[in-house]
């Protein structure tokens, strides 16, 4: 799949700003709402956001390092890889979220969390926006990043951005669904 780089970057920036704004909306919620879980095996709003933070802890430094090392010139077209496109499509949210197992080190279930999780998310996403901006100066197809499940596997930087953005969308929707469940159970 080929994507015009300027359009991809604009879309990533728009979606990330939207993610920041939606997460900021959670600040008005009570601790009870933020920590509500439908069952002991489901995540609260804060656990959804912390899960994203745990991925940000890996991907932001990884992307930053790869951009810094990149010795490529920008291209007008980004060519998605087979593996990258697969991961992005797997992560895209659907009308009803398909359940997926998460890796133990990225699973915040049962953690004691507070609103500082939202601050951390906001800081990470603003850094992510800066990385997207910096990527305009390199080739998104030729620059590769390791992935969180294996440092031996790499994705094209454009696919890494697409994956992270889809992953963020998926779990923000999950958090919003938790809030809807809280409101429905409260009524």
Image (cartoon, helix red, strand yellow):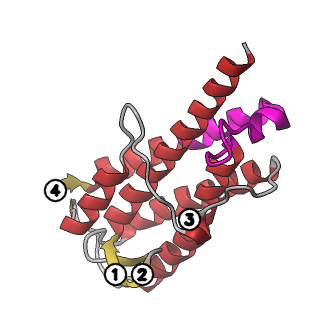
Vertical side of 143 occupied by 47: above or below? above
Q: CA distance from mark 4 to mark 3?
A: 26 Å
| Mark 3 crowdedness (10 Å alpha carbons): few <14, some 14-19, many ≥20 | some
Please tell me the numbered disc located at residue 2: 4
Q: In the rendered view, does 89 fall on the left or right side of 148?
A: left
Q: Earlier in the sequence, mark 1 or mark 4?
A: 4
Between label 1 and label 4, give the one nearer the viewer. Answer: 1
Q: CA distance from mark 4 to mark 2?
A: 26 Å
Can you tell which quarter of the image residue 19 is in? top right
**Residue located 51% across and 61% down the image:** 102
Q: Quadrant of the N terminus?
A: bottom left
Q: Earlier in the sequence, mark 4 or mark 2?
A: 4
Q: In the rendered view, does 56 fall on the left or right side of 8?
A: right
Q: CA distance from mark 2 to mark 3?
A: 13 Å
Can you tell which quarter of the image residue 106 is in? bottom right
Please tell me the numbered disc located at residue 55: 3
Query: Could you say where residue 111 lies in the image, as x and y percent from the top left?
Result: 76, 58
Q: Are marks 3 and 1 in contact (CB under 8 Å)?
A: no
The residue at the far top in this view is: 187
**Residue located 77% across and 32% down the image:** 33
The span picked out in magenta is: 19-45
Q: Quadrant of the C terminus?
A: top right
Q: Are marks 1 and 2 in contact (CB under 8 Å)?
A: yes
Q: Would you name the residue on which mark 1 appears?
A: 153
Q: Earlier in the sequence, mark 3 or mark 1?
A: 3
Please tell me the numbered disc located at residue 150: 2
**Residue located 52% across and 70% down the image:** 59
């Amino acid at each position: 799949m080929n994507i015009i780089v300027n359009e991809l970057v604009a879309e990533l920036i728009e979606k990330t700003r939207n993610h920041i704004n939606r997460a900021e909306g959670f600040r008005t919620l009570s601790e009870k709402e933020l920590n509500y879980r439908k069952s002991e095996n489901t995540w609260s709003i804060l656990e959804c956001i912390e899960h994203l933070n745990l991925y940000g802890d890996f991907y932001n430094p990884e992307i930053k390092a790869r951009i810094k090392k990149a010795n490529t010139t920008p291209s007008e077209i980004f060519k998605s890889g087979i593996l990258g496109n697969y991961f992005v499509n797997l992560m895209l949210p659907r009308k009803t979220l398909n359940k997926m197992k998460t890796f133990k080190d990225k699973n915040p279930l049962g953690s004691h969390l507070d609103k500082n999780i939202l601050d951390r998310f906001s800081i990470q996403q603003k850094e992510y926006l800066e990385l997207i901006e910096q990527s305009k100066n390199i080739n998104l197809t030729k620059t590769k990043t390791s992935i969180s499940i294996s440092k031996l596997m790499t994705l094209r930087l454009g696919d890494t951005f697409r994956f992270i953005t889809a992953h963020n969308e998926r779990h923000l929707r999950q958090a919003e669904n938790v809030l809807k469940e809280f409101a429905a159970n409260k009524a």
